[in-house]
Amino acid sequence: MFLNNSMRLVPFAFYSPYENMAIDEYLVEYYEKTRRPVLRLYSWRPAGISIGKNQDAQGDIDLEKCAAASVAVVRRMTGGGAIYHKNELTYSITCSEKDISDGVLTVKETFEKLNAFIIGMYSKFGFKAAYSKDVFPSGVSHGQRAPLCYAANEEYDIIINSKKIGGNAQMRKKDIIFQHGSIPLENNKEAPGFCRGDVASSNYTSLNELTGREIGEDEAAANLMAAFMEEFGVDLRREPLGMDEKRGVVGLLTAKYAMNNWNLKKIK
């Protein structure tokens, strides 16, 4: 449960890959100034690939194929493997340890606490979801690196019917916790083709595959917000980005997220 019983909601909207990552970083700056927790919902238009902060773009991603297909590649401020963002609902949470606990939490404990609402969201679609560590206590190598996020397993990845669904990543800045993650509506079978090497995996699923029908972003967002409020006992106060905030986002966009120096730089 959040110790603060109200939280800002930046409502669902489509943005470009570069804009999405700039907005997420802006919300960390916003939290530093206001100490107001924020939940944001969004999607990607056009589709794009986000890579982890320390990922080798040129080694893991076929940049020539991405350019030929007009697929943007943007570097996140969080770690982990690449995600091809298409036909999905994405969320981000900005808060601090003090917002979610009156004690000290490890990184793993914050994942367990913050990911609980996602399990609740999937239950609203009629599915029993669980953490990978509970489904595969042995026999799966948790934490093994892979160029594509969906081809790897972490302890707090979410599993339905023995398959991984979505992915989540965190960034810490002093006491601030920033987490974002994807809720896949459809399997993007073309995703492995944008990565170098053999990253094909059948060990992932999506809402459309599970339900056997087409789930839209609005339906997924409604269930996600309901599960979030139920899990954390908060009121979500709808507050879109204002004009001054949009100017701050543009500053991050033009100085960082739209620049190849940030997105495609070689990792030393």
Image (spheres, rainbow, N blue to C red):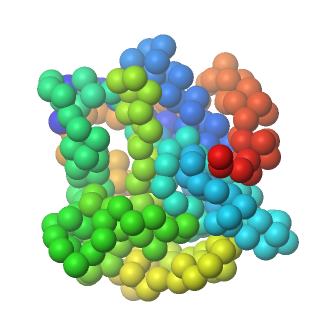
Q: Is residue 39 above or below residue 118?
A: above
Q: Residue at x 29, y 33 (%)?
A: 235
Decide if residue 7 is on the left or right side of residue 79: left
Tally the numbered discs: 0
- Can residue 157 be seen? no
Position in image of residue 211 (x %, y %): 35, 80
- List the single residue furthest toward the top: 33
Counting from the top left corner in percent of width and height, residue 137 is at: 16, 70
Residue 113 at x, y = what percent? 22, 45
- Residue found farthest to the front: 268
What residue is at 65 percent from the left and 49 percent from the top? 267
Q: Residue at x 41, y 44 (%)?
A: 170
Residue 13's x, y, as percent? Answer: 58, 47
Of 238 and 104, nearer the camera is 104
Q: Looking at the figure, which quarter contains the N terminus?
A: top left
Residue nearest the observer in this picture, 65 or 237: 65
Quarter-of-image position of residue 96: top left
- Residue 176 appears in view: yes
Apparent side of residue 144 relative to residue 192 in the rendered image (left or right): left
Quarter of the rendering containing residue 121:
bottom left
**Along the horizontal axis of the image, is 252 left or right of 170?**
right
The residue depicted at 59 percent of the width and 66 percent of the height is 84
